[in-house]
Amino acid sequence: MKKRLLLTSLLLAGAACAQTSDTIRICDASGCSERPRNSASFDPTHDEHPEETRRLAALADIARQDPRAAYDLALRHYRGDGVKRDSYQAIRWMREAGDRGVPEAHLALGRFYLSGVEEMGADPAEAEKWLSLAAARGDKDAEKLLVEARSAKKTEQELYQWRQFHRQHWLGWWASGYPYHWYWSNAGWYYR
């Protein structure tokens, strides 16, 4: 009975604090306030750079038809040339160009994956794939980098195998092998 009474009083208290449908509670660094729902502070249709957006959309349309435009779009995203710098979009469009046979994209992707780009770590196996395509065309830079990619791939595989072998032993010690310094008893913690 007491639980039911407590629950009912909590529900009534919550109903009394409920917001009306025409206001919304907004909290920011300056505090909280009730504001009309129709006073949105974010307008997704507002574009601060309409000309940049128009040019980017036009180049993306061309890039869907011409892989060389996809390569150009990738470079623009990577460099931040006329568009916001975005390494994810750079790699996305560079892969689009590479998949559709643009020779410069093969070398660029090989370099991107060999060294890693910003938040993307290096991937020697992926670098080897793209550099092999460029080297098959006779690209001398790609041939040199392909040797490095294969070496890095081998090193990466060796490092993985080493980690896997030692992980079994070391993590086992953390789970049960290392003793504690402090122990709990009815009187509290004591040092061993």
Image (cartoon, rainbow, N blue to C red):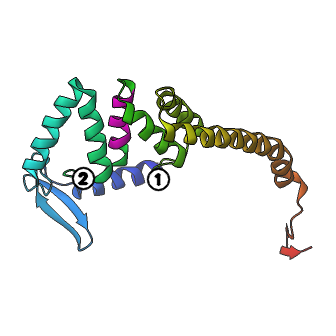
Q: Foreground residue, 182 or 127?
A: 127
Query: Label 2 vs label 1: CA separation?
Result: 61 Å
The verdict on residue 169 being magenta is: no
Residue 164's x, y, as percent? 78, 41
The verdict on residue 94 being magenta is: yes
Mark 1: which amino acid?
Answer: Lys
Disc on res. 84: 2
Say if 162 sits above or below 25 in the image: above
Residue 46 visible in the shown view = no
What residue lies at 22% left-to-right and 57% top-to-bottom? 16
Q: Secondary structure at mark 2?
A: loop
Q: Quadrant of residue 191?
A: bottom right
Q: Foreground residue, 92 or 69?
A: 69
| 168 to the left or right of 144 | right
Residue 25 visible in the shown view = yes
Say if 118 sits above or below 182 in the image: above
| 93 to the left or right of 38 | right
Residue 99's x, y, as percent? 39, 25
Q: Which residue sits furthest right?
A: 192
Disc on res. 34: none
What residue lies at 83% left-to-right and 51% top-to-bottom? 170
What residue lies at 9% left-to-right and 42% top-to-bottom? 54
| 93 to the left or right of 168 | left
List the residue tagged with mark 1.
2
Q: Which stretch did the figure color magenta?
A: 89-98
